[in-house]
Image: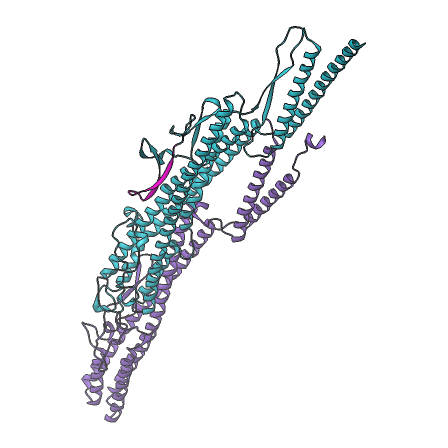
Amino acid sequence: MRITDGMVSEASRAALQRARLKVFNASQVASTGVRVEKPGDDPSAAGRARRLREEGARLEATMQAADEGRRGLDAVDDTLTHFSDIFTEARALAVQGGNETIGATERGLIADQIAGLRADLLQSTATRFDGRYILNGVGEDQPPYDAAGNFVGQRALRSVEASAGHFVATGIAIGDVLSPVAGTDAFAELTALETALRTNNSAGIAAGINSMRDIGIRVADARGDVGNRMMSFDLAYALGQRLSDRTQADLTQTVDADVFDALTELQRSQTALEQALSIAAKLPIPGLAQRR
Amino acid sequence: MPTLTSLLHVGASGLRAATLGVNVTSQNATNANTVGYTRRAVMQSPVPGPPEGGNGVATQGPRRIVDRFVERRLLGATSANTDAVSYRRLAEAANFVFTEGQGAITSALETLEASLRSAASEPGDTGRRRVVLTQAGLLAESFRNASNDLVKAREEADKRIAEAAEEVNQITAAIDLLQREIRKAEVTGVEASDLRDQRDQKVRELAALLPVAILDGPFGTVGVTLAGGRSLVNAEGGTLQLRTDVDPATNRRVVLAEVSGADVDITSEITSGEIGGLVAARDGVLQQAEVDLDQLAFDVAGALNAAQSAGFGLDGATGRNLYTPLAGVSGAARSLVLDPAVAGTPEALGFATDPTQLPGDNRGALALTDVFSTAFARGGTATPGGALATMVTQVGSAIQAADTEVSRSDAQLAQVKSLRDSVSATNSDDEMVSLMSYQRAYEASLRVVAAADEMLQQLVQLGAR
């Protein structure tokens, strides 16, 4: 094929352009560390990365829900522990008050303590966490009991998605523990016990001992349920963390550049550019026009 | 029988031939870098004479050294290359719209879902509700921005198509004018090389805009047609005038030509060149992205509205949409805005399904988050995120195919240009050899003239004695 001056310079120009483009692309990847920025960089990787990012964001959100749920139940559990203590003490006081050896004055003092425990219990049902009444189920903007100890709260609980498709109830409807629909009301029982002590009603005191025990068991059962849900949140969070780590690793592998490969490619393309420049610098190729 | 006088004429013809040769060689050498220049050559042949001797040398030319087949291939390669480049350039708009980053649709969907999940943990928290509204507004804005970007790219393509059509008219007019000059010059039998070069360069400029073919005409002229056969420049004279207009049915600019007094839409005949590439990208990857975006916006808005309107706000009211209901799919992305009933009113978000269980009931919020995991997009086959991922892959594939085509057409164009240059471009070594050769020929002819002159002088001196 006949080679012309124009072909030589055009080939050199094209080689320089190609080399510069390679250097540009390699430096972009090496400096950002990202291989896939736009869909056109690698279509299937870009699509996969989109799905992984969505999955990662969803996992983060569910983990946050699990964490918040867990912390809320922590506060509930602390309060139930206190309730448990109240009913344990109330029962002990009732036993003491049922002793035939003590007099009316002492029974009166025990009755005062029972009244104090009732007041403590009522106040504790209005426990707040993060500005919300945590013992009133979905009715978190008001306490579950009025000043007289009547239940005015909510029995429904809110659930959150702790992991994909797995919902766990947060909070507690204390009404189901202290004032169950089919069962004895704790405040009424404490009031009855106080009255029995003041009137030296042995049968009433004995009934009070049993009811304090039964209510204590209800509180313990509630604690058990809360404990199970806390464990659910913990497990969900741990699973979410593992999945999130794996998703992030997949995403990194999909879109990020291998640093070593990127630097090697940059070095290689820079060398090619230098060679192209060196060859271009040797133009024009000597010809007869220079020799005459 | 040859005479001394005829010998002078023989020498003179050689001088003329050598001078013409040197002139043509100089022209070639000095135009080595002129774009579109075709090297010329002088054909020499002996002038017939009596058997005892000749009558010197006659010259034909100068003529351009051209391979018509390669020239035609160059036109095709040029159109294919500008087609690929303009397609790729325009398709970048779709590439950009689906790039990950702050404010992109991709991240806006995610952050709205995350804000809804956060609000589902504390549905009574006004701060979290406000965040949901903000993210919902940002999602709408990202859809509008993406749609506007695609529409803007489409409008820029239409503008460039209009400009290119006008350029076509200017170039065809210039070709027509040049051909008149060529015809005038070549009627005498001499090739109008410079005019032909200028004409061919114009034809190549035309090929960059749309696919053309050339048919040889009389007296050095050519007919220029669209690749499909419609005449753009008549070899006998006359051009086809193009104009553009917006097709009301598609709202896209089309190329029209006046044929027998009526406008004919010739857009589909422009399958290559810059105009062809712009039309293909505009009506292909960009249009598909617009349609998919509108469909996704419509589907997402509809699903979120259904969940939101079924829920109760903190005020106990229900039946309020999250987004202003969309009239239809077309233009949905561009029209997506928060419904005035909820905009700026976080309490209006329907996070509860039972008004007696406010503020803690979050089942409405859970229904809203469930939208993102439900396959209602793409005809019920994909979640919103899945639909978006599919769109990302589709656009990416189109871009990658366009990149491949640009590389392929670049390589093909370079190869054809090399072939063309190999035949028609100047090689300085060739010209230097020709120059030396013509110089020697001139010297030889000069010697002939000098010898004839000396002989004549001797004859005259003899006669004078």
Q: Is residue B252 magenta?
A: yes
Query: Dividing the picture into quarters, in which one does residue B129 lie?
Result: bottom left
> Which quadrant is home to the N terminus of chain B?
top right
Q: Colour of chain A?
A: purple
Q: Nearer the viewer, residue B18 or B362?
A: B18
**Residue B312: horizontal and vertical position, in percent?**
23, 65
The residue at the point 26 percent across, 62 percent down is: B364
The residue at the point 37 percent across, 49 percent down is: B150
The residue at the point 29 percent across, 69 percent down is: B124
> Which quadrant is home to the C terminus of chain B?
top right
Q: Is residue A236 visible?
A: no
Residue interval drawn in magenta: B240-255
In this image, B464 relative to B107: left or right?
right
Q: Colour of chain B?
A: cyan
**Residue A138: horizontal and vertical position, in percent?**
26, 69
In this image, A101 relative to B400: left or right?
left
In this image, B313 relative to B440: left or right?
left
Q: Is residue A27 magenta?
A: no
The residue at the point 37 percent across, 54 percent down is: B145
Query: Dividing the picture into quarters, in which one does residue A109 lie?
Result: bottom left
Up the image or down, A190 lies above or below B238; here it is below
